[in-house]
Structure formats: structure tokens, C-alpha cells
Image (cartoon, helix red, strand yellow):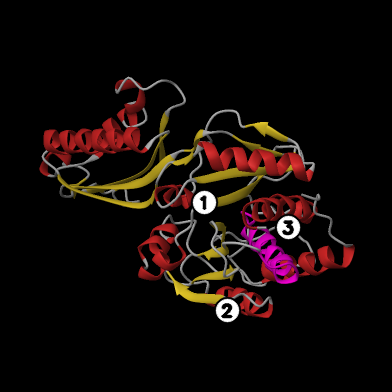
Amino acid sequence: MTKPNYDSSFIAELTALRRDLHRVPELSSEETETAKRMAGWLADCEADEVITGLGGTGVAGVFDSGVPGPAILFRCELDALPIHETGIPNWRSKIAGKGHMCGHDGHMTILCGLARRLQAVRPKRGRVILLFQPAEETGAGARGVIDDVRFKSIKPDFAFGLHNLPGMKLGDAAIREGSFCFASEGMTIHLSGWTSHAAHPEDGRSPAGAMLTLAEKLPALPRDLGMEPGEAIVTLSHARLGEPAFGISPGEAWILATLRARTDEMQARLMQAARDLTNKAADAAGLQLEISTAERFAACSNDAEPTAIVRKACEEAGIACAEADGPFRWSEDFGLFGRAAPSAFFVLGAGEDYSQLHNPDYDFPDEIIPQALAIFETIAREQCG
């Protein structure tokens, strides 16, 4: 097919949209106004069907040729982060404490651009589905979408997604077959004994010893389980012991840890080992124990056929596509779509010397909108005409 070529006025329209979205971020599962805007854009682009409230605030636009053929899904994210923006672009966030510090504003814009292109040249066979997914940052969004009964009507034959990546050459792509992003889950451990006067700690039951044991042994779990270096990691993200008072021997402790592993199977082993270790430490100290978990992400693994489709699209669009160097330790709930259909997720360089994702001064690089759009459109045209 002919390499996509976009005129400057079209790219300017998309850039303006991206910056508008950046000004009004909404957090996970609260993306009501953002979702309305995306639904309106899809309607303006004459999508054959616009589904709203999908898995919460999700939106899907379906461009249906009416002719038998594959169903191809492209997915982006609606949500922003609870981070106060410190950068000073003219389009900086208007909402204190909230910001698009991960580039989801850019990812949405790319799909909006694809909607415009599908409006101009309709698919000749099959269906192209543009999914604007909520709550990616908490890991709840993809699960909510897939569990929504209406997802069955748009269940794809292939699913594709991308993420911008600082530290990588601007506009270059990278992908790999197999493991691409780690599974992860947050664990909160609450240890309860009872307080006493600090002059008589023996009259209480302090969780300090158990807390210190867990702080030492939780990060060592991957090694103790015989996992290879780089295949799993346990990160202590928060700890609290008692109250900030000199006269009280503590009666409670909290530990927050994030557990990550290359595969879902390894993640399950790691989580169970953490539970077993925590139960053992609490029992030995005579403490009550509560464990809760949150923000569960499945591992993201790329299937062979859609990975090859991405590589071919990059070649035809004139975009360099490298082999990604091992799976990324960060997580992406796009991995769940791999259970619904063969899928592929890739990264697109945001620049080698660029502020990192989730940094307070991060801002999506508008320069990569044409490259990302070209990859997605080439895939859509190759599969659906």
C-alpha cells in the first residue's frame, strides 16, 4: 500500500486536540468528560456505532464495512495521573494535582486521527474498532471492558496498542514477540499487636520485629524462589510503624509492596510466597494480620502473527522498528486483551533525552503523532482495506 502522508493542517488539528486534552486531565474511572469528548469525535467522524459506558467510562467506535473480513481493534487510554504538573507549556493542566504525565492524551489523539482517516476512506472489508479504555493506571480498565457484556459484539480478531517511551530515539518503534511487560500487583500488609508505655515495651506487643523481617525478606523473594535475575522484583513502596510519639511503644505497622514478574505464572508464585512469608512473620510475633491487594496487572505478551503485522506496517510506513531489549518491568493492562484475541503492543520513542513517564514535567511529544498514526493506519488498511 502507499505510505500514509498527512498534510500539515490535519496534523495541526490533532496537535491542538492533544493539547486541549492535556489541559483537562481526569483520573482513573473518573474520565466522564474526556469520554464524552471522544464519543463526540467518533460521531463527527461518522463511526457506524459508538458504544459508551463500556467497562465504566470506556468508549468504542466501530467502522464497519458491511463486508465479511477481520475485526481489528486499536486501543488507547483515557486516564491521567494524580501528579501536579511542574512543566510550563501553554497547555499545562488546569486542574491542580492532576496531569497527563504518561501521554494518554497523545495516545487518544492518535486514535482520533485514525478515526478521521477512516471517515475519509472507509474500510473495504471487516471492521475497525477504536477503543478508548478507562482506568489503565489502576489496572481495572481493561478487565472492566472485557467483562462488559457488550464487548462480545466488538470482540476482535486482532488487538493492537502502543505506548510512547522516553529514552528511545524520537519516532522509532520497538517490539518483541513473547513477554513485553511484567505482571504486577500491589500488596498492603497490616500488622496489629497492642501499644504500651514506651518505658514498659514488654507490656505491649510491638510489630517492629516482624516489620523489619518483612522489609528485609520481601525484596529477596525472587532470589529465594530461584528466579533468574531480572525476572521478578519486589519493591517496598511505603512503611509505617506506630505513631510519631516518643512515649508509645507501637501497636500497629503497615507495609506496602509492589510485586512484579515476567509471566502470570511467576507472578502467582511470587504473590503466594509473599503471603506465606507474611503469615509466618505475623504468627511468630503473635500479631494479627490483614493482607489486601490492589492494582493487579496481567503480564503483556505479544503473539507472533500480530507482532509480524506491526513490523511490516513499520517497514511500509518508513519507520525504524527495533527488537525490544527484553520485557519491560513496568506493567500495562493491555495484556488482558491478549486473552481475548491475538495481540501486539509496541513502544514508540519519545526522544533519547526526554523527561520520564510519570515525572511532573513530562509532556507528550507531539512530533510522534504522525508516525504513530501511520503505523496504525497501515495496519488497518492492510487488514481491512
**What main secondary structure does the magenta stretch of the protein show?**
helix
Q: Quadrant of residue 98?
A: bottom right
Residue holding disc 2: 36
Residue 157 vs residue 252, the one in the foreground:
157
Residue 233 vs residue 85, the one in the foreground:
233
Query: Please, which residue is most extreme toward the right here?
Result: 8
The magenta span reads: 101-123
Q: Amino acid at mark 3?
A: Gly
Dot 3: what SS? Answer: loop
Residue holding disc 3: 87
Give the CA distance from mark 2 to mark 3: 27 Å
Q: Amino acid at mark 1?
A: Phe
Q: Which mark is residue 158?
A: 1
Report x, y in % for residue 110: 69, 60
Nearer the observer, disc 2 or disc 3? Answer: 2
- 10 Å neighbourhood of mark 3: few (<14), some, or many (≥20)? some
Above or below 220: residue 167:
below
Q: Amino acid at mark 2?
A: Lys
